[in-house]
């Protein structure tokens, strides 16, 4: 017998309520991570090196998850993510130094040191907006055509950005730009808490939440449809150019935020830190975790960051081992560690806590209609 859709009864369009366990699981996990990373740092239980590695993990998670939105979920190939990270790093650094600290080229400070508590997070957002605007210059010509043009253009943009910054003496040119350590120190003198660790935690959780919410929304379904078949997506009334531009700008903006954090943690930036080697490092993290997997990106960014730090005594030879790891991965696990699956797909028991309830998935599939 053919199923015929009937008029839904009153109230059937309401999304099924979630149990208290599913509502509380994610905030509880975030709270545990906060207690395991930020609180011990504030109490001095972690030495500065461990704090630095934890912040690098957060920065790399933001970079990897944001690049996975374009390369993994949308199926395009961007290879110049370090350029957008660099735009955010320079814009954020120049803003905080010029407003709070001052230097011989930019002049004296315009605001008191205590204002760094407000200026710092705003400068991160400004760096993200600047990176998104810079990304718009790439998106407009790239998404007018299909194919591998985005890879070619982003590769060229990475070299253009590096050459441009090297010739701007006002921000240090090839010698680099410094002074951000005084900004983070000013925040610590105003209120003695690990501010960079806190903002790295907020940026990491915020990025994962934003990208997860986006790819599980109707707009996210359009992104995945473009990856599967762009022509078919257009036939299904998806505005492919608008979807690609929005997703790409969001990816660039998040990379800019990561760049601002990276600059203030390191205290010094120069153009060499945002070259093709950095872009390759982020690409390795994306492919290692799996294309189209947020938890895979998180695990690969954390694991590879720790691995790079463990191999630091090998100096330049670690950059021989990392590409070798990528070659072995492509040979024996071409889809990455997680493929397109999430951790809840690998361990179904986690669905009781973090997965979407079956009735919720049925609601979105049927739009609340009763068959």
Image: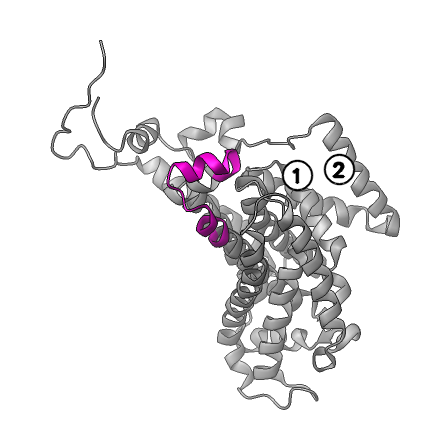
Q: Residue beneath label 2, please?
A: 326
Q: Quadrant of the C terminus?
A: top left
Highlighted range, magenta? 226-246
- Secondary structure of the residue carrying numbered label 2: helix
Q: Residue beneath label 1, please?
A: 287
Q: Quadrant of the N terminus?
A: top left
- Nearest the viewer among 353 and 267 is 267
Mark 1 in CB contact with mark 2 (< 8 angstroms): yes
The percent coordinates of residue 87 (x first, y second) are 62, 66
Compared with residue 219, is residue 40 higher up or lower down, i.e. above or below? below
The percent coordinates of residue 335 (x first, y second) are 64, 30
Q: Main secondary structure of the magenta part?
A: helix
Image-based side of 268 in relation to 371, left or right: right
Q: Quadrant of residue 232?
A: top left
The percent coordinates of residue 23 (x first, y second) are 35, 41
Few, some or many C-alpha atoms within 10 Å of disc 1 (few <14, some 14-19, many ≥20)?
Answer: many
């Amino acid at each position: 017998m053919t199923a015929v859709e009937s008029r839904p009864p009153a109230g059937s369009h309401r999304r099924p309520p979630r149990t208290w366990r599913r509502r509380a699981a994610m905030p509880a996990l975030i709270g545990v991570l906060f207690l395991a990373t930020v609180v011990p740092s504030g109490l001095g239980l972690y030495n500065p090196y461990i704090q630095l590695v934890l912040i690098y993990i957060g920065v790399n998670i933001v970079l990897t998850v944001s690049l996975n939105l374009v390369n993994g979920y949308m199926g395009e190939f961007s290879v110049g993510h370090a350029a957008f990270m660099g735009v955010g790093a320079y814009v954020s650094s120049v803003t905080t130094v010029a407003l709070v600290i001052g230097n011989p080229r930019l002049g004296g400070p315009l605001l008191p040191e205590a204002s760094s508590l407000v200026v710092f997070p705003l400068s991160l957002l400004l760096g993200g907006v600047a990176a998104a605007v810079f990304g718009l210059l790439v998106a407009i010509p790239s998404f007018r055509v299909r194919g591998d043009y985005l890879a070619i253009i982003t590769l060229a943009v990475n070299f253009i950005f590096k050459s441009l910054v090297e010739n701007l003496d006002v921000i240090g040119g090839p010698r680099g730009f410094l002074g951000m350590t005084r900004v983070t120190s000013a925040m610590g003198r105003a209120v003695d808490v690990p501010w960079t660790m806190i903002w790295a935690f907020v940026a990491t959780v915020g990025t994962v939440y934003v990208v997860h919410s986006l790819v599980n929304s109707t707009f996210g379904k359009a992104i995945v449809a473009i990856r599967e078949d762009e022509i078919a997506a257009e036939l299904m009334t998806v505005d492919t150019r608008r979807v690609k531009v929005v997703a790409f700008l969001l990816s660039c903006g998040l990379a800019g935020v990561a760049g601002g954090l990276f600059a203030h943690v390191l205290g010094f930036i120069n153009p060499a830190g945002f070259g093709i080697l950095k872009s390759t490092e982020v690409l390795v993290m994306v492919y290692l975790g799996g294309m189209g997997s947020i938890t895979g990106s998180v695990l690969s960014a954390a694991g590879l960051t720790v691995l790079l730090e463990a191999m630091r005594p090998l100096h330049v030879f670690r950059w021989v081992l990392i590409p070798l790891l990528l070659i072995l991965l492509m040979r024996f696990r071409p889809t990455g560690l997680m493929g397109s699956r999430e951790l809840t797909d690998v361990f179904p028991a986690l669905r009781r806590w973090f997965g979407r309830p079956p009735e919720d998935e049925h609601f979105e599939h049927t739009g609340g209609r009763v068959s």
